[in-house]
Image (cartoon, helix red, strand yellow):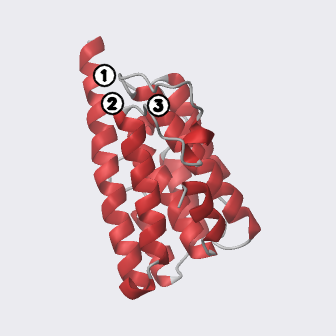
């Protein structure tokens, strides 16, 4: 099943987690630390204060100088993900946000990948399943997005189990992107 199909079938909670996971993996290009979005994950798990946690994250990641190794375009895409996050993790706007985060996260990975993303395919085409000649970083991000949505629709894991596993997948992706940004910074220095 393509990523587009998985997003279309996801419920509000799955969409909110999917969008949050995309943003979470892109935090390194905003200069944020690994714990920054934990309160948002917690609010998904226990129904806590999403709006307050989101406001805190926005304040912490107020526009500043971009981290060394992050392109200006990648920073702008990640910032838009954060700024577009809905004030509640339910409602119609969550679907639009999750879909936009999916596209933006793939584009961030494409911008930071040193290998070319071949076959002239757009990020949207990748999401629809046309994956020939994908660059490694984009391919890994696409797999993570698909895996997270699959985990969140797997009712056997239970609601908390699916979120915990989604967070684990996201943390792995964040470490990868942080290493890419760090390598790029060292290459420029």
Cα–Cα gap, marks 1 and 2: 5 Å
Residue 107 seen = yes
Q: Which of marks 3 and 2 is in front?
A: 3
Q: Is residue 25 left or right of residue 91?
A: left
Q: Residues within 10 Å of mark 3 (few under 14, many from 20)?
A: many
Judged from the image, the secondary structure of the residue bearing numbered disc 3 is helix
Q: Along the line of sight, which residue is nearer the eye, 3 or 68?
A: 3
- Which residue is found at the position 59% from the left and 66% from the top? 15
Mark 3 and mark 2 lie on one chain; the one further toward the N terminus is 3
Q: Residue lying farthest top?
A: 189
Q: Is residue 165 left or right of residue 66?
A: left
Q: x and y percent of residue 26 in the render? A: 44, 44
Residue 66 seen = no
- Which residue is found at the position 55% from the left and 56% from the top? 2
In the picture of the structure, the residue carrying the numbered disc 1 is 184
- Is 167 situated above or below 2? below
Q: Is residue 24 left or right of residue 63?
A: left
Cα–Cα gap, marks 1 and 3: 14 Å
Q: x and y percent of residue 164 in the render? A: 34, 73
Cα–Cα gap, marks 3 and 2: 13 Å
In the picture of the structure, the residue carrying the numbered disc 2 is 181
Image quadrant assignment for residue 70: top left
In the picture of the structure, the residue carrying the numbered disc 3 is 110
Q: Nearer the viewer, mark 1 or mark 3?
A: 3
Q: x and y percent of residue 184 in the render? A: 31, 22
User: Residues at badges 1 and 2 in contact (C-beta under 8 Å)?
Assistant: yes
Image quadrant assignment for residue 134: top left
Q: Residue lying farthest right?
A: 92
């Amino acid at each position: 099943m393509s990523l587009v199909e998985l997003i279309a079938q996801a419920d509000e909670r799955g969409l909110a987690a999917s969008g949050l996971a995309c943003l979470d993996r892109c935090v390194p290009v905003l200069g944020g630390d690994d714990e920054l979005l934990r309160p948002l994950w917690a609010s998904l798990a226990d129904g806590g204060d999403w709006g307050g946690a989101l406001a805190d994250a926005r304040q912490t990641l107020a526009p500043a100088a971009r981290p060394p190794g992050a392109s200006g375009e990648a920073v702008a895409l990640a910032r838009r993900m954060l700024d577009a996050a809905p004030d509640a993790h339910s409602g119609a706007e969550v679907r639009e946000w999750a879909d936009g985060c999916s596209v933006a996260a793939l584009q961030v990975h494409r911008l930071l990948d040193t290998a070319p993303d071949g076959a002239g395919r757009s990020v949207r085409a990748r999401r629809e399943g046309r994956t020939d000649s994908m660059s490694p970083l984009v391919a890994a991000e696409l797999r993570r997005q698909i895996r997270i949505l699959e985990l969140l629709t797997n009712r056997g894991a239970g609601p908390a189990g699916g979120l915990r596993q989604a967070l684990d997948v996201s943390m792995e992706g964040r470490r990868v992107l942080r290493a890419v940004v760090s390598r790029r910074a060292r290459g420029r220095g």
